[in-house]
Amino acid sequence: MVVAQAPGPVMPRHGGHWNVDGKPLVSQGPRGNIVINPDDACGLELRHASPACCGATPDGGMNQLCACGTLVATLCSDCCLPYELHLSADHVRAVRP
């Protein structure tokens, strides 16, 4: 189970949380997904990630496998992209701990 806190701006590995106009960076993933820091998720296994120089790209779609055997999320972890995990709203739900 993945538990997420209140949403906030995307946090790329390089640079700040804000664009040049002082506005929070916004994730480019599908609408309705839950976006969290990949380090906050546990129990997911990387599958068929699009090749990148040092991490996964979201180009191939969902690439995180749940322990139940279902693809549930898309990891974006390459050095030149925002570091984030998109949980599919069709496959996961937020619950209070």
Image (cartoon, rainbow, N blue to C red):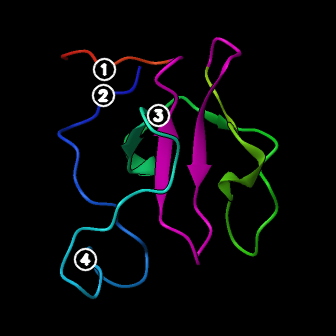
**10 Å crowding of disc 3: few (<14), some (14-19), many (20+):** few
Q: Which mark is first along the chain, 3 or 2?
A: 2
Residue holding disc 4:
18
Where disc 1 sits, the SS reads loop
Q: How many marks?
A: 4
Residues at discs 4 and 2 in contact (Cβ within 8 Å):
no
Where disc 4 sits, the SS reads loop
Residue holding disc 2:
3
Query: In 3D space, how far apart are the residues under numbered discs 4 and 2 (Cα atoms)?
Result: 25 Å
Query: In 3D space, how far apart are the residues under numbered discs 1 and 4 (Cα atoms)?
Result: 26 Å
Q: Which residue appears at 68% of the width and 59% of the height?
A: 57
Q: Amino acid at mark 2?
A: Val
From the viewer's perspective, tell me whether residue 3 is left or right of residue 72: left
Residues at discs 2 and 1 in contact (Cβ within 8 Å):
yes
**10 Å crowding of disc 1: few (<14), some (14-19), many (20+):** few
Q: Quadrant of residue 81?
A: bottom right
> Where the C terminus falls, by quadrant?
top left
**10 Å crowding of disc 2: few (<14), some (14-19), many (20+):** few
Q: Which mark is first along the chain, 4 or 3?
A: 4
Boundaries of the magenta span: 67-91
Depth-wise, is mark 2 or mark 3 nearer the camera?
2
| Principal secondary structure, stretch drawn in magenta | loop
Q: Which mark is first along the chain, 4 or 1?
A: 4
The percent coordinates of residue 25 (x first, y second) are 32, 68
> Where the N terminus falls, by quadrant?
top left
The percent coordinates of residue 71 (x first, y second) are 67, 25
Q: Amino acid at mark 1?
A: Ala
Residue holding disc 3:
42
Residue holding disc 1:
94
Q: Which residue appears at 75% of the width and 75% of the height?
A: 53
Task: Examine the rendered structure and indicate whether residue 41 appears above or below residue 97.
Answer: below
